[in-house]
Amino acid sequence: MKVTVVIPNYNGQRFVKACFDALKKQNYKDFETLVIDNASEDGSYEYIKDNYPEVKLVRLKKNYGFSAAVNKGIDLSKTEYVILLNNDTEVAPDFVGELVNAIEESDDIFSVSSKMINFNDRSVMDDAGDLYSVFGWGFQQGVGQDIEKYNEPMDVFSACAGAAIYRKEVFAKIGKFDLKHFAYMEDMDVGYRARIYGYRNRYCPTAIVYHVGSGTSGSKYNAFKVKLSARNNIYMIYKNMPFLQLVVNMPFLCTGFIIKYIFFNKMGFGEEYKEGFKEGMRMMHTLKKVEYRKEFLQNYIEIQKEMIRGTFLYVKDYFSRHMEIQTFMLEDLIKNFKSSK
């Protein structure tokens, strides 16, 4: 076997049939599937066991979170590559094969992110690889935009671990997913570390997956997610930025924190954002920083350039997305006006 598909599961019974049926239809066959179950209580573990006997199942004693589950899967896999896949997905028949082809293009590729498309509206993107900005904002490239805009492969800041392939041997150098993250931004953190070590993260438009999104947490924005994301963002910055880079970016980071607080406060999650931010500041000293090495200097420079580029792309994506929404609303308004005549 060349690839292990690792699927973390927590109370995902409503998703698993579509997910596992799609994996059975893969054109590429040289892979095995491993499910790490975080002590599900909805019968999903039993359902997988009864209906998909080819799938290897490991059940944890409690819900240890995404990071612990995928780390367990990485440790148990015996293959050269590991694909991490959310349970709220449905992959296209060439998904596994295309990811394998993409990562084998070069030995300096650590991860490859797939073309994630909105499960319920398959004309719009969910994620074309993750980017990072000088404001400390990680974001899904292309989210909410036309799928035809993202048909070219490219380097990205990090892969979205909801549907991505990783070169397993690199984890021994950079470390696996940080357990203190529990969930959220752990994939960007590990992608950041890979960049520091000189590896690349790629986006593959021919590896297609349809993604429900927030299948476990239940919604795009909720108190749990806002708090952990705020905390984990502080963790990621503290761990990966050397002192000089932190000083350079500090005015932008502070601006980003303020804007995020205002945004979430308007949505009713201001207190959760503050709690997460404070916890991150209070506990960041307990995390292991990436050791600064002189030989990584050029990599840090490239990362800074990528963060600046990511800032402009975020602005471009934001206005493009909102222009499309306004155009759609205007067209709908004209259509309704004409029909009322």
Image (spheres, grey):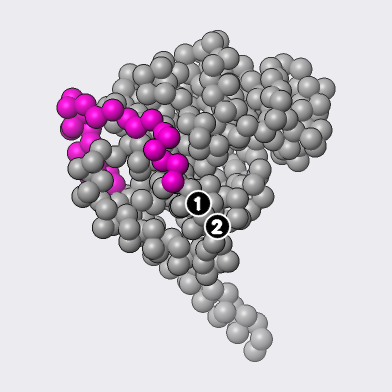
Please state which of residues 21 and 151 is positioned toward the viewer in this rendering: 21
Please state which of residues 23 and 331 is positioned toward the viewer in this rendering: 23
Image spot of residue 194 (x, y percent) = 35, 29
Residue 307 part of the magenta-drawn span: yes
User: Which kind of residue does numbered mark 2 sit on?
Assistant: Glu
Residue occupying the point 22% across, 48% down: 247
Residue occupying the point 49% across, 58% down: 274
Alpha carbons under labels 1 and 2: distance apart: 6 Å
Residue 14 part of the magenta-drawn span: no
Answer yes or no: is residue 133 visible: yes
Q: Secondary structure at mark 2?
A: helix
Q: Residues within 10 Å of mark 1 (few under 14, many from 20)?
A: many
Please state which of residues 94 and 257 is positioned toward the viewer in this rendering: 257
For the N terminus, the quadrant is top right
User: Which kind of residue does numbered mark 1 sit on?
Assistant: Gly
Left or right: residue 148 compared with residue 306:
right
Check whether the beta carbons of the residues at disc 1 and disc 2 lie within 8 A of each other.
Answer: yes
Range of residues picked out in magenta? 282-309
Residue 17 picture quarter = top right
Q: Is residue 253 above or below residue 295?
A: below
Extreme residue in the bottom direction: 341
Q: Is residue 172 above or below residue 294?
A: above
| Residue marked by disc 1 | 276
Image spot of residue 163 (x, y percent) = 53, 34
Please state which of residues 95 and 78 is positioned toward the viewer in this rendering: 78
Left or right: residue 186 compared with residue 28:
left
| Residue marked by disc 2 | 272
Dominant SS in magenta: helix
